[in-house]
Amino acid sequence: MNAFSSHRKMRSRSLAGQVIALVMAAMLSATACGSSDGVGDSGDADPGDEGEGDLTGGEMILRDFSLPLPLFSEASAWNQSGAEAAVLPDSDDQILATYRQLIGDSSRLVPGDEELSWPFMVVNYDAFSYPIFLAGDGIDDVSIRDYDGQSWFPSPTFPAAEQEGGPVAIPPPAGRIRPAGPTGLDSDGHVVLYDPAANREYDFWQATTAEGGSGESLGGGRPGATIIAAGAIEMFDLTGAGANPPGLSSARAMGTPLLGGLLVPEDLERGAIAHALAFALPGPRNLSDDPFEPLNSDWSLPASTTETDYYSTDPDALAAGQRIRLRSGIVDDQGELIDENDLAPVTRLFLEALREHGAILVDASAGFTFYAEDIHTANLTLSDADVNELTGKPPDAPLDTEKTKWQIVMEALGRDLDRIPLASGSWPDNADPSTATVGTSNFDVIESTIEP
């Protein structure tokens, strides 16, 4: 086991922030995108400003480049069809265990103090999402240091960087960047740098773009000119399998690339989401006596390891890299059939992807979470009429000028997903959620992807 595969990705604070993000998404209380928050480069910000911040505020740095679809090879896990994959024999048991966790059963979670009660789908498109920036020319040396100031060993993907704390030599960003929010130290601070010349992505967790006067990180959501340090850095070939060697984590604890399964504007611009989606849940399975040495059965491709900080000891919990697939008919939380013709066209595209390609478990989170590109970089280039068509509005309806087109479409998707739970179920009032039963599931657990 190498030092990189064993390091701890501290998520305890960010999980609390994700709960806030889930509640805000459910209440549809997202505010308009703001202008720059006034935070500059290293040393330009107030080190005392470490709150969670507003979820949709901050400098907009909309990208002016396109990603080459499909991302990763046609044979990669992300592009394999899931429509004909077999349902696993233990699917019902795994769905039940997952449902119970989502509605508040923490009896098998480590740690078990997170308050969970939200079985509906949520899509992260701002806080705890993934902004994408263009890599520039030259080389930057970036330290491997998280928001707590702790140094880590670099990934063996960078063989020349062998000492704790790095540095790692990577391309610099081509312009200003902003790690994902919320603003401050409660953020995961993810960043993706896309290098079109090499057809690579560079992924960062807890990227620092601004420091206080004594050199401490000011956390995520801070615009800056360069990446000074990051808690983890990984590189993936966008023509390859989109997976790490066994045992390695990445900017995600499970080792998957940040672009793997990410919903991006290019998907909607071509009229189909032709790849698997990435999702996260509370408590992915880790049954090892030593969580830093997970069992091989606790992960499958495209994951390369599993969680060590926030996991489940339930043998029926979903494992890293497992796939789920949406059933042909879906119900609400009362078990009533949902008429999909009432859903926005963007939602129907999303549901079609869940049926054709499925979704892959890539991370731990505070809820049933999917991922779309951060609204601070996502640039949807469709016409106003096309945006209205995606959201189910008349072609000539005026768009909200205080929101980007991507935000408008993602909010419409979020409103619909707020109606669609993992499953409908029941349990007596005030009873332990571990006694809940599933009436109708909207999902099946299907066989994992095959190695390319």
Image (cartoon, rainbow, N blue to C red):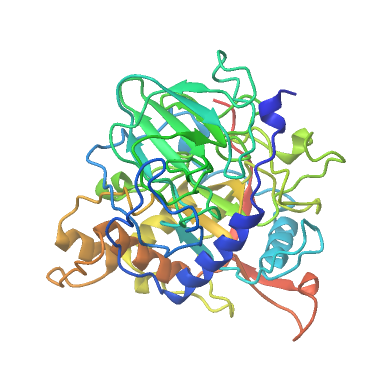
Depicted 67 relative to depicted 433: above or below: above
Q: In which quadrant is the C terminus drawn?
A: top right
| Residue 309, image x, y percentages | 72, 47
Residue occupying image coordinates x 72% and y 56%: 94
Q: In which quadrant is the N terminus drawn?
A: top right
Residue, far bottom: 429
Residue occupying image coordinates x 68% and y 30%: 5
Can residue 77 be seen here? The reply is yes
Q: Is residue 155 left or right of residue 308?
A: left
**Residue toward you, 257 or 219:** 219
- Residue 389 appears in which quarter of the rendering? bottom left
Residue occupying image coordinates x 66% and y 68%: 116
| Residue 266, image x, y percentages | 29, 44
Residue, far right: 289
| Residue 48, image x, y percentages | 50, 57
Depicted 317 relative to depicted 25: above or below: above
Depicted 211 relative to depicted 96: above or below: above
Residue, far left: 396
Q: Is residue 287 left or right of residue 68?
A: right
Depicted 405 relative to depicted 235: above or below: below
